[in-house]
Image (cartoon, rainbow, N blue to C red):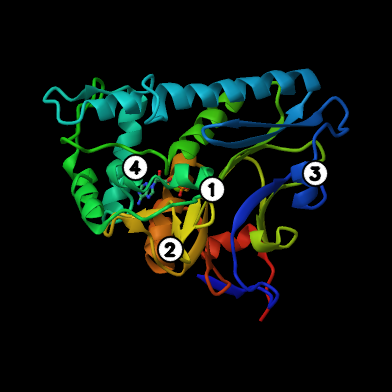
């Protein structure tokens, strides 16, 4: 484990990830739109929204292929949300599962969903319940996403009684998954799935398959809010740069990950979606033990993995677990992790050293 301290100018740290393709600072790249010369291959950038977040794509290919591929990406994401993951849309599998709560016959699962839920239950067990996709009753009670989107005016935290009742409905140890090929799930009455912690990661894995199945794209960086996929290479052979910035001063980086080929980087932080009331910040990462936003000295966690579900799931889990347990969990999964603490300290796994360059102060 390595520890670093950022420069004295960084008073409060806030971790965010942006990606840089080509040269220049992250800020320039985020505002950049267009194409770069690289012979036949050009770098085309597209910005859109899907899955409730901003989607940024940089695709290295001929302009025509890049354009066509970027549309495939958007179609895939929209589809994944509406047919699989959304708990709001009646068309989705998660919606169907939630509607089956309390029913004796349960709900038939697609193979993909059965595998995804099995991975989530494994993570629940390995985190002693800190990661729990059955937290739907609690996340809906807080409804931080909506409050944050609407500006948070008039927000009041739910009452302790309501929190207690919502928590009593949760617990992945109480859901039943049966069968493999024609799998079925049985949710107890009142339990609701919330796959918000892994949805973007699942999307990254799907995008990776899409990229593997084509021959026109030579490289891509696709960012879905806090989860980023790098794939292939750039025409000049330089590495992908995934930047770790201090968002209180977005022009300053606290680190950069230099990556070659295919990687998934996911970040969870208390700054991503939150509301404030009476001087208290209520963010979207909830501690199943208390039914309240997780409290600790972690401000942000980034996880680097080949697999999107693992990077996304573990970044959320590590945020709640903190550096000691989080580091052990990352080691179990064979992935790298970087924590930004509230005093500005950066703690990372030994393996992360190879990829991360951080700005050290004292
Ligand atoms: P992320 O931004 O990937 O860390 O995911 C945060 C989202 O995961 C929240 O908006 C909730 O939908 C969901 N969530 C919050 N707390 C937990 C938790 N303890 N376990 C699993 N999912 C959670
Ligand atoms: Mg996550």
Q: Which of marks 2 and 4 is in front?
A: 4
Query: Badge 1 is on which residue?
Result: 151
Instruction: Compute the Cα span from label 4 to label 1.
Output: 17 Å
- In the structure shown, which secondary structural element does the residue marked by tag 3 occupy? loop
> Nearer the N terminus, badge 3 or badge 2?
3
On the question of residue 237 being in view, the answer is no
Q: Which residue occupies 34% across, 24% down?
A: 93
Residue lying furthest left:
104
**356 on left or right of 107:** right
Task: Indicate the secondary structure of the residue bearing disc 1.
Answer: loop
Where residue 206 appears, as percent x and y from the top left, is 51, 29
* Between discs 2 and 1, the one toward the N terminus: 1
Task: Judge the density around disc 4: few (<14), some (14-19), many (≥20) Cα neighbours within 10 Å.
Answer: some
User: Compared with residue 248, is residue 173 higher up or lower down, i.e. above or below?
Assistant: above
Distance between the alpha carbons at the discs numbered 2 and 4? 29 Å
In this orientation, which residue lies closer to the viewer: 46 or 278? Answer: 278
The answer to whether the residue labelled 2 contacts the one labelled 4, judged by CB atoms less than 8 Å apart, is no
The answer to whether residue 346 is left or right of residue 166 is right
* The residue carrying mark 2 has its beta carbon less than 8 Å from ligand 2: no
Earlier in the chain: of badge 3 and badge 1, it is 3
What is the residue that sits farthest to the front in this orientation?
Answer: 154
Q: Position of residue 319 (x, y in %)?
A: 43, 58
Q: Give the residue number, with chain letter if any, for mark 3.
A: 22
| Disc with the residue nearer the chain's start (4 vs 3) | 3
């Amino acid at each position: 484990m390595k520890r670093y301290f950022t420069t004295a100018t960084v008073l409060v740290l806030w971790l965010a990830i942006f990606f840089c393709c080509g040269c220049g600072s992250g800020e320039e790249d985020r505002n950049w739109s267009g194409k770069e010369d690289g012979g036949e291959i050009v770098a085309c950038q597209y910005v859109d929204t899907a899955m409730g977040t901003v989607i940024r794509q940089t695709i290295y290919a001929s302009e025509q292929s890049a354009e066509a591929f970027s549309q495939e990406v958007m179609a895939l994401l929209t589809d994944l949300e509406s047919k699989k993951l959304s708990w709001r849309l009646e068309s989705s599998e998660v919606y169907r599962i939630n509607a089956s709560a309390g029913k004796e016959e349960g709900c038939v699962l697609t193979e993909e969903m059965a595998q995804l839920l099995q991975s989530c239950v494994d993570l629940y067990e390995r985190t002693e319940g800190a990661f729990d996709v059955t937290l739907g009753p609690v996340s809906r009670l807080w409804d931080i996403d909506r409050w944050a989107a609407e500006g948070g005016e008039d927000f009041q935290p739910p009452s302790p009684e309501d929190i207690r009742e919502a928590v009593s409905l949760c617990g992945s140890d109480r859901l039943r998954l049966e069968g493999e090929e024609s799998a079925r799930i049985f949710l107890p009455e009142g339990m609701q799935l919330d796959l918000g912690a892994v949805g973007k990661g699942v999307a990254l894995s799907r995008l990776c398959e899409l990229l593997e199945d084509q021959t026109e794209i030579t490289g891509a960086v696709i960012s879905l809010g806090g989860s980023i996929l790098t794939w292939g290479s750039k025409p000049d052979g330089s590495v992908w740069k995934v930047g770790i910035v201090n968002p209180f001063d977005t022009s300053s980086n606290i680190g950069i990950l230099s990556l070659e080929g295919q990687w998934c980087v996911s970040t969870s932080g208390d700054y991503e979606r939150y509301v404030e009331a009476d001087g208290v910040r209520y963010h979207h990462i909830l501690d199943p033990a208390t039914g309240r936003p997780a409290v600790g000295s972690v401000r942000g966690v980034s996880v680097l993995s080949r697999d999107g579900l693992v990077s996304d799931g573990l970044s959320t889990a590590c945020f709640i677990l903190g550096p000691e347990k989080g580091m052990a969990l990352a080691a179990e999964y064979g992935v790298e992790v970087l924590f930004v603490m509230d005093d500005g300290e950066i703690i990372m796994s030994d393996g992360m050293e190879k990829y991360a360059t951080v700005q050290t102060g004292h």
